[in-house]
Image (tube, rainbow, N blue to C red):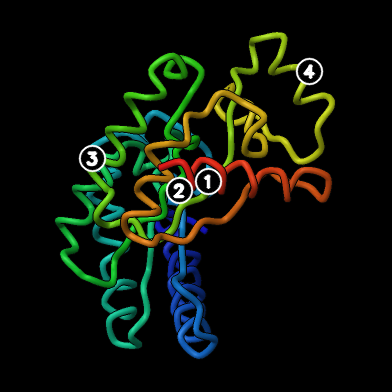
Amino acid sequence: LSLCSPDLADHEKTVEIYKAHLRFAKRMGALLVGTETGAPNTTYSTCPECFTEEALQLFIERVTPVVRYAEEVGQLFAIEPVVRHIVSTPERCERVLKAVNSPNLRVILDAVNLLSEDKVSDAKAIIADGIAHLGKDVSLLHMKDFIPYATERGQQVKAAVANTDIFSNVVSCACGLGDMDYAPLCALAKARSIPMTLENTNPGNAVAAREHLEKIGASL
């Protein structure tokens, strides 16, 4: 759900849904309620306006009441930076954290979601930047792997492996099938006891994905 829809009736409904999720999460003992940060339109579509200062300020304005409600019910609310959305970079995410200024506003870090086809070659630097800016505020890690779709290997994996996605011309796949260097992320998880969820897995590779990460963690 997007907190920045220009349809105010739709926005009010979204806020009430997030508040309900926060109440249920508290009663269930869930870690947090998380959201990606959407776009300033009614279709949740990436557009040039996503990356403007105006969109970022609108998101800060819209997310703040939800976070204040999270404070009231004693639950965490987390935002996930995604390269195609309003909070598209670690720096923009850090600005939201500082502006809202609440211990109940946290971060879900999905390193692959910080990448696009033109940034894949700089993946290590981008992920290191994400950890440097947001590491202390991360409460959950989404773990998956990536391969540029333009490569022959990327197209082969997309065609052959169930539950892969093409995201910004990057194939998202189960951990261990692509080019990700997990050591920095596993080190962060180990240092701060941050839980992980596995993404883009299927029954045939989920165990291997978990074991791949456990092997890296054990070596640190």
Q: Identify the mark nearer the N-term, 2 or 3.
A: 2
Mark 1 residue type: Tyr
Q: Which mark is in front, 2 or 3? A: 3
Asked if disc 2 and disc 4 are in contact, CB closer than 8 Å, the reply is: no
Asked if disc 1 and disc 2 are in contact, CB closer than 8 Å, the reply is: yes
Q: Which mark is in front, 2 or 4? A: 4
Is 7 rendered above or below residue 94? below
> Percent from the top left, x then y, of residue 42?
51, 49
- Judge by depth and name the residue closer to the eye, 149 or 38: 149
Q: Which mark is residue 156?
A: 4
Q: Which mark is in front, 1 or 3? A: 3
- Judge by depth and name the residue closer to the eye, 7 or 117: 117
Give the CA distance from mark 2 to mark 4: 30 Å
Give the CA distance from mark 1 to mark 2: 6 Å
- Residue that numbered label 2 is attached to: 38
> Percent from the top left, x then y, of residue 158?
76, 26
Left or right relative to 132: residue 45:
right
Left or right relative to 217: residue 176:
right
- Residue that numbered label 1 is attached to: 44
Instruction: Please state, as top left, top right, bottom left or bottom right, where the C terminus lies in the image.
Output: top left
- Residue that numbered label 3 is attached to: 132
Q: Which mark is in front, 1 or 4? A: 4
